[in-house]
Image (cartoon, rainbow, N blue to C red):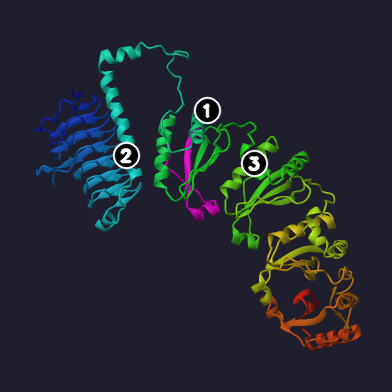
């Protein structure tokens, strides 16, 4: 039987209002307001807090088996009517089996067809919504006619017919969500009816409370319903709620995900696991084809306690490898298997033992080529397992990108380690050398291929003279035009350390040219350019192990009074001894900036004095320009040396 409270306060139109016509099988909560010519069909649910006022515009019709949820407002203008399915005129027509959800506003003249779903806080005004439409949350529909079977996404503003005609069709997943919400409200209807029947409610009241203090404040956060979310995520949600944390979401498309520019999702104010899961599933549907992550928020301390990706653009839900618990204590290392397998556990242990901090950086393929790394989150943990678990989570967030581990000396404000732990192909970089981190000379087990090229002597001389070490790389096309890309600078405590890092850089640029740069920081000039790797994977042997002369000279490889110095002579002597040819190239300042070198006259002689004379003549011919010495392996048709011997 319908239960109604007092009518709403009188209005200018309420002097001669008709009485509502409510079917005996409908349920109208006593905390709802219904006035005027309102016709409510069989088995309709009108929840508390609703306002259905047919005082200004009338009549209203609500079809059988529809449910009007808490906070819904139905009102109509004095003028303007729509034609109902019975052929008569109405201010508001709501068809059969409709669901008007919380805080929805239906303002006449308005027509809502059969089997429609109107989402939370959505508004329909002066419009017709066809049969079987699903309107999601926070939608405005005004002055249009929505064709049957259309889906209106959350936040849409539909105010012209062109927008309405372009709306997508309803899918099975949308229907499943709508039926889920409708089913919940049908259960509420049974509960409301039971609460007013003493024979139904008294046995429930007399049941024992079970475990608890009897205060009625104990709340269970266990969730036993079905969900598309992974059980581990549902369990995490329960743990977060049990600890008093709030739940939030963020979403990002593929472009924003790469830059870490997440957008905040709709707030979730639910208090039970089931309500949160339902809201999350709705959010996942709203952001199909995007990344979505779950947030656990400590509102008291204004911090995040959890960031977990729960959806990816391909529709897959990210599996959670941990036990799903949220805690500030040591986390399990089950989720860090892929990173742990790279052999960096020992390095992390050494970093922690020495009081260093752990940081991360990431870069897509384009940024990796230019060395433009983005700063990732710093990692603090109580042990190696905890940090490995967090590293694995960061790596999973940046799939398809490079991720590297940073060891930081906070006292001296410097980096003691840079180690790539993930590549775009998904594989985790394995550590070839030792896992120890030290400020002293490290082992060079990872630098065997570079060390075999004979660079050790040159690097030692460069370090002894206070020069810095840099790198450049280029693919075959860029190599031909001399358009080298700048690689990372290298700092180390010894030759072995630098050789190890050079080998790592060479492995990162397999299939490309890599060259070593010796830099005089005082005079801001280059003192050495040495190719150390070629696209065929071979490491170019050096022509001489000696580095440029001391800084007492104007340049390590420049002309002094028209004569070449001993450093260039040593290079030439080494090249000729190995059977290589010697050539030269020149470029003015403009061409030098673009790497567009011009070839000089070829030098055919194998005699050291004749070659030196030819070089001296080339320098005199191209005074005021850059000139560089070329070592050529004529059999392999490749260059083994490129060194600038004159500057403007």
Q: What residue is rendered at 68% in x and 70% in y?
A: 484
Crowdedness near tag 3: few (<14), some (14–19) or many (≥20) residues, C-alpha within 10 Å? some
Where does residue 237 sit, x and y in percent of width and height?
49, 33
Q: Which residue is mark 2?
A: 178
What's drawn in magenta, residue-wise? 244-268
Q: Which residue is mark 3?
A: 337
Can I make out residue 326 in this image?
A: yes
Badge count = 3
Q: What residue is rendered at 21% in x and 26% in y?
A: 27
Whole-Å distance between the Cαs marked 1 and 3? Answer: 28 Å
Where does residue 469 sit, x and y in percent of width and height?
78, 63
- As drawn, the label of residue 243 is 1
Residue 189 occupies quadrant = top left
Specify whether residue 344 is painted magenta: no
Whole-Å distance between the Cαs marked 1 and 2? Answer: 31 Å
Q: Is residue 625 above or below residue 359?
A: below
Q: Secondary structure at mark 3?
A: helix
Q: Nearer the viewer, mark 1 or mark 3?
A: 3
Q: Work out whether mark 1 precedes mark 3 in sequence or the reverse, and give the earlier one.
A: 1
Whole-Å distance between the Cαs marked 2 and 3? Answer: 40 Å
Where does residue 66 sit, x and y in percent of width and height?
23, 35
Q: Secondary structure at mark 2?
A: helix
Q: Quadrant where the N terminus lies?
A: top left
Say left or right for 394 vs 60: right
Q: Is residue 537 above or below residue 59?
A: below
Dots 1, 2 in contact, CB < 8 A = no
Specify whether residue 257 is painted magenta: yes
Where does residue 434 sit, x and y in percent of width and height?
79, 48
């Amino acid at each position: 039987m319908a239960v109604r409270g007092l009518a709403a306060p009188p209005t200018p139109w309420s002097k001669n209002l008709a009485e509502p016509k409510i079917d005996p099988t409908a349920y109208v909560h006593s905390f709802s307001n219904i006035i005027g010519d309102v016709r409510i069909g069989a088995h309709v649910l009108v929840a508390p807090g609703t306002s259905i006022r047919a005082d200004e515009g009338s009549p209203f019709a609500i079809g059988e088996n529809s449910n009007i949820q808490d906070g819904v407002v139905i009102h109509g203008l004095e003028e303007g009517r729509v034609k109902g399915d019975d052929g008569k005129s109405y201010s508001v027509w709501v068809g059969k089996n409709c669901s008007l959800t919380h805080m929805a506003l239906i303002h006449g003249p308005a027509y809502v067809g059969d089997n429609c779903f109107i989402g939370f806080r959505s508004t329909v005004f002066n419009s017709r919504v066809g049969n079987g439409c699903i309107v999601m949350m926070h939608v405005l529909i005004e002055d249009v006619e929505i064709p049957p079977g259309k889906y209106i996404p959350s936040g849409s503003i539909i105010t012209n017919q062109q927008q309405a005609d372009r709306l997508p069709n309803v899918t099975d997943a949308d229907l499943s969500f709508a039926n889920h919400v409708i089913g919940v409200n049908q259960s509420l209807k049974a509960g409301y009816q039971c609460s007013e029947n003493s024979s139904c409610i008294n046995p429930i009241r007399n049941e024992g409370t079970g475990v608890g203090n009897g205060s009625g404040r104990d709340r269970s956060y266990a969730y036993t319903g079905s969900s598309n979310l992974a059980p581990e995520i549902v369990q995490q949600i329960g743990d977060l709620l049990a600890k008093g944390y709030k739940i939030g979401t963020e979403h990002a498309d593929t472009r924003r995900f790469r830059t870490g520019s997440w957008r905040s999702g709709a707030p979730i104010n639910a208090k039970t696991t089931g309500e949160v899961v339902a809201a999350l599933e709705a959010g996942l549907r709203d952001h199909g084809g995007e990344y979505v992550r779950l947030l656990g928020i400590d509102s008291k301390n204004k911090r995040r306690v959890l960031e977990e990706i729960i959806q990816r653009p391909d529709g897959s839900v990210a599996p959670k490898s941990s036990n799903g618990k949220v805690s500030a204590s040591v986390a399990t290392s089950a989720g860090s298997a892929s990173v742990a397998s790279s052999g960096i556990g020992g390095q992390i242990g050494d970093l922690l033992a020495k009081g260093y901090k752990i940081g991360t950086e990431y870069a897509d393929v384009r940024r990796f080529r230019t060395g433009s790394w983005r700063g990732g989150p710093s990692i603090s943990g109580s042990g190696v397992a905890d940090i490995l678990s967090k590293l694995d989570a960061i790596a999973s967030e940046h799939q398809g990108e490079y991720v590297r581990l940073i060891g930081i000396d906070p006292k001296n404000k410097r980096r003691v380690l840079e180690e790539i732990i993930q590549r775009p192909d998904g594989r985790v970089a394995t550590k070839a050398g030792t896992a120890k981190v030290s400020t002293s000379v490290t082992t060079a087990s990872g630098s065997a291929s570079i060390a075999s090229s004979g660079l050790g002597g040159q690097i030692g001389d460069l370090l002894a003279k206070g020069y810095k070490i840099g790198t450049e790389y280029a693919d075959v096309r860029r190599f031909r035009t001399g358009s080298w890309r700048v690689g990372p600078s290298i700092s180390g405590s010894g030759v072995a350390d630098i050789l190890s890092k050079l080998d790592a850089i060479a492995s990162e640029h397999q299939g490309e040219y890599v060259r070593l740069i010796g830099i005089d920081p005082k005079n801001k000039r280059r003192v050495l350019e040495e190719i150390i790797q070629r696209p065929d994977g071979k490491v170019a042997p050096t022509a001489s192990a000696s580095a440029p002369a001391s800084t007492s000279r104007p340049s390590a490889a420049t002309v002094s009074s028209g004569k070449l110095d001993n450093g260039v002579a040593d290079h030439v002597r080494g090249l000729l001894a190995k059977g290589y040819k010697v050539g030269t190239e020149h470029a003015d300042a403009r061409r030098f900036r673009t790497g567009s070198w011009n070839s000089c006259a070829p030098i055919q002689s194998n005699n050291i004095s004749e070659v030196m004379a030819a070089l001296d003549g080339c320098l005199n011919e191209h005074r005021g320009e850059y000139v560089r010495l070329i070592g050529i392996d004529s059999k392999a048709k490749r260059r083994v040396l490129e060194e600038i011997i004159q500057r403007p």
